[in-house]
Image (spheres, rainbow, N blue to C red):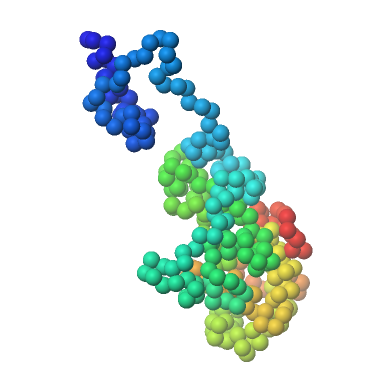
Amino acid sequence: MSASWFRALLYKLMCVTSAGLLAAFGTAGCKDATSPPAPVAAATSAPAFAAPAEVTPASYQAAKYDPIHFKPAIEQATDQQCLACHAEVLKPSVRKASPAGLEAAAAKAWYQRISTYEGEQDTLHRRHLETPYAKQVMNLRCTTCHQGSDPRDQAPGSSATAQADLTLRKTVKPEATCLMCHGQMNWPVMGLPGPWAEFKEPFQNNCVVACHTVQRTVRHQVNYLNAQAIEELAAKTDGGDVCFGCHGGRAWYRVAYPYPRHPWPDMPDDVPEWAKNRPTKSEARFIAVANPAGEKQ
């Protein structure tokens, strides 16, 4: 077996490895695996394959499986840590026109149909983090919604080490996060004659004045909302749009969110049938650093 033939065989084997495939598609070196490589240079020449330079930052694979993407580390992650790699989520990237040719400026998105939304269409992350109204009434953080996922298949119970509370193929758990502000308004249990959009005028379009000066007066005491700002805006004329915006006005789901019933002064002792299985306090991670004053953390 000649040395040149052996070198050619090694070269072919290299091109079917993952490293070889990258070379085949990324450089001209492996495009023709049937051609033998150039003769080996003399011992005094530079090595044929230079050692790879140190990767800074970490490789994609290393970053993908970084502990910050999993519990418990993700629970302590800051927005700055998340945005160090995911800064693109806050960049304006809305299409000027739909694939069918309808211009965005000529149509209203579902989230634009409440008076509290101002401006043009915007991306999901920017609507929740960057718009003036979001900064006024919300205090959302990356980890409010993102609690980690298994990058292997994003399916619960798929392995001995998989997270048990994953939602199939989702990077968030929508029934525990999105639904809190994008569920349907449960007007039957509120004793309303019909949907709020149809009957808000008899109630002066003001939820606080109509009912919530005595009912459910302990509310919004969670760390992802600015409670004081919400209460002040809701008490103004047509303040019902502030409440309805998150309680049915921007519904993305067909069901309502089962909000916890935090005890309030003069709360009736009798629990309604529909509320008997409701929790009496919010999820721990939402009340650990709750900020009733509405100040940014």
191, 73: nearer the viewer: 73
Q: Is residue 263 above or below residue 38?
A: below
- Rendering coords of residue 57 (x, y %): 56, 36
Residue 191 visible: yes
Q: Is residue 159 left or right of residue 143?
A: left
- Rendering coords of residue 6 (x, y %): 26, 15
Residue 245 found in image quarter: bottom right
188, 94: nearer the viewer: 94
159, 12: nearer the viewer: 12
Q: Is residue 179 left or right of residue 26?
A: right
Q: Residue at x 31, y 29 (%)?
A: 30
- Rendering coords of residue 115 (x, y %): 60, 78
Instruction: Name the image quarter holding the N terminus.
Output: top left
Residue 68 found in image quarter: top right
Instruction: Name the image quarter holding the C terminus.
Output: bottom right
25, 163: nearer the viewer: 25
Q: Residue at x 24, y 15 (%)?
A: 5
